[in-house]
Each structure stands twice: as C-alpha cells, then as structure tokens.
Amino acid sequence: MYPDWPESEADLMPLPQVDGPKLKAFKFSRARKIDFLEYAGAGTHSQVFKVKIEGEIYALKVFRWTDGDEWPGPDIDPDAYSHEALTAFANHAEPFNCECRAFARLQESGHEDLAIRCFGYVLINEEEEKEMVGRFERARYPGKRSGREPPLRAIVKAFGKVDTLFNASVVKKMFRDIVQLHRLGIASLDVATRQLVDGKPSDLSQALTTPNFIMTPELNPLLSPEQVARLENETFRCCRTDFARVEDLVLVWNQEHKKARDKIWIDPFPNQRQHNLRKMPARRNNLPYTFADPRLYDWRKSSVASDESEGSINATAKGGRRQRPGGNVDSFRGSRGSGAKKKQRRIDLFPARWYYECDDKEAADLEGWRDAYPRLSEYEYRDGLIFPPAPKKPPPPMAPLSELAPEHRRTLEAFGTIPRQT
C-alpha cells in the first residue's frame, strides 16, 4: 500500500505501481541534502515546507498518513477492509497517489504548464523526519521488506507565491484550464483560489486520473450495465462540480462586492464555436452537460509513449553527464542537458460538449450538484476488482390502509405519514 524504505536507487520506482501515469523519484545529482528553510503552511492532506536542494529553492509537500475520513476512501474504519482492498482503492484515490498520477499525466502528455511544476517524489529519511518531529502521524502498515513503518512521502514542486488577485481574467483562465485537464483525463479537482500559485493549480491531491475504477469501467469486465451507468453518473458529477465551483467563487465575489463596477460578469468561453441548433435533436438542448469528457483520453497510448521516452532518458543518464536536481522532469521538456524531448499531446481548446442522457428529475438534481467526491464508502472490493454500489431498489408499496395492523397505523399517524382517522 505504501512504499518501503529504499535500500538503493533501484527501489525508487515510479509511483503508484498501477496501470496509468506514474511519477518518477526526484533526481539528486550530488549527495542527498534537503535544507528545511521555513514552514510554509498546511492543508487537509499535507504540510508544505520551503526547502533548498543543491542551491535551488523548492516547495516540499509532505503527505500525512490519513484514514478514509480524510480522503474519499472505502470506509472511515480501515480495519473493516483487508490490506489488499485498501491498496486497490488507495492506488487511485489516496491523496499522495492522486497527486503523483495527475502530475505524471501532465508530464507524459507535455502539458506541465497547466499546473505548478513538479520535479518528482521523495521518501523522507530519518534525519529529515527529525526536523519535522511532532507534525505527522505514522502509517498503519509496515513495509514487507523492512518490517518497519514506511517513510513519509513527499512531492517536490516549484516554490511560488499564492495568488490573491481575482478578476474576470482569472475566472476565464480557470475555466479553460479545467477544460484542458478534463481533456487529459484528470477530473475531480480542488477548485479554489487558495491553491493557485503563480497563476496555476498547485494542489492535485483530490484529482482522479484515468485509468481508474470510476472513470474507466473497462478495468472491471464483470460490471453490470447498471453499474457502468452508475460510474458514468459519478464521472459526470465530478466534472460538473469542477465548473460549478468556479461559478460559486464568482457568486461569492459578487455578493461581497456591491458596486457594479467591481462585479465579475463574464462568459468563460466567449470565442467558443456555436453549435448548429437546427441539426441538434430538440431533447438535447434540455440535457445537462459539461465541457469535456475525461473518459475519452487515450491513456494506453500515453503510457506506451512515456515508457519509450523513459528508456531514452535512462540511456542518456547512464552516459555520465551530471544532471541538475529534478532532472527527470527536464528530460520530458527537452531542456538543455537532458535526454529525449517529450512531444506535446494536442488538446482541442473547444471540444464537443458532453451531454448526459437522463430524465427531467435527474437533470434538475444535476443542475445544483456541488459534491465532488464519489461515495467510495459504498463501493465494494471483490476478487481483485472494485464494484460501485448497485442502484437502490424502490421500497415495496405500502399495504392498503384497510389492511394495516392498529399499532402500525397509530405509528404512521403519529409521524404524519397518513392522516388520522376521525
């Protein structure tokens, strides 16, 4: 479930070890040394430090060991699930793994500019942990090889300034960035101004990246048609919520700013091509929609291209040339002194909308939806596969009033379920 203490660099495998994008370990070009300069802040899943590594300033995000009540895990009580089951959920939904997968997807697709730059992960050693003593709780599961509680996990990012500016341009950019992230198979984002650093998202610890057991139903060949439909619904709600959160930010801003000149009035896509309504079915105009479908991203093609690029990078690294810290990321971008140049995957800035087929009642429910988290506590792990909950069956019809037992009738009358007899 968690990485074990490494005995050599060969143990620092890209994480998480599951199908899809994986984040590589941070590359130290000299003897490892992390200087902790100051405490930068904390969030639900982590604490952040300003650090210096080989003369460069970085933000080091160190992840807490969390149970299911702090991430959308299968249950708030881990003892109710086996280690194998928790691992299956954690590989896709635990905050550290979420962030690893999302940043790795940006790297393998050549779109690192959509978020703050990430340089890889590190496993905090004992000396470094002493500098953070008292700030973290340890994990529950010891490593299989060492038998010790696993090391704290961290991600190295560019250090920047948290943005305080909020205006129409910021809103427009947030919408467009969300569309592009969805097109890259990344959804369920923590959309908030507090996580914008140098104008870019910095926190992807809640993101779901394809392939995963929600957005990629083909991972489980035993799903029923009803369960596949449930996963489609969950995915659509995640995407809708990402955009709805931006609308909420604008709503709060306008409520706090009474003067018309200070309010934000904006169409997030003023240049989006218009749909030909004459050629669209009449019903479609009333369906809820979102601006991109993350399930359409070809993650298999990206994974193969990433593996081929990694082979070229490793061949270059073995040539003996000294790399700057975090050089594994430079190799993806093709900067000076690096290996292979990573080809950028083209993204359509104005993709076809994703219309969700549903009845009027569900459409009305989706209009006001704001909960980004799938209800994983209802999911089940069986025989190595994860299943969504089955659709709830409607309650059986109540017996005719004339057939109710007197005590049952009095109870229903007391709760106002049925009118009292006169």
Image: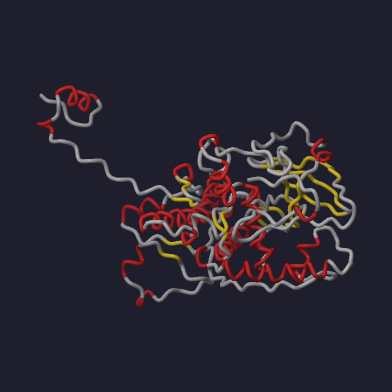
Q: As drawn, is 337 to the left or to the right of 18?
A: right
Q: Residue at x 78, y 40 (%)?
A: 39
Residue 193 at x, y percent in the picture: 63, 50
Tell me how many marks there are: 0
Q: Is residue 55 above or below residue 342?
A: above
Answer above or below: position of 410 versus 6: above
**Is 348 in front, or is 144?**
144
Q: Is residue 206 left or right of residue 277?
A: right
Determine which quarter of the picture holds residue 419: top left
- Pinpoint residue 66: horizontal percent, then vertical percent: 62, 39
Image side of residue 380 versus residue 204, left or right: left
Does residue 348 appear anywhere in the picture? yes
Color scheme of the displayed model: secondary structure
Residue 182 placement (x, y as % from top left) = 55, 62
State which quarter of the image contains the C terminus: top left
Horizontal and vertical percent position of residue 33: 87, 48
Quarter in which the N terminus is drawn:
top right
On screen, residue 397 above or below 20: above
Residue at point 54%, 47% (across, down): 252
Q: Is residue 191 visible?
A: no
Q: Nearer the viewer, residue 237 or 146?
A: 146
In the visual, does 168 lie left or right of 49? left
Residue 2 falls in image quadrant: top right
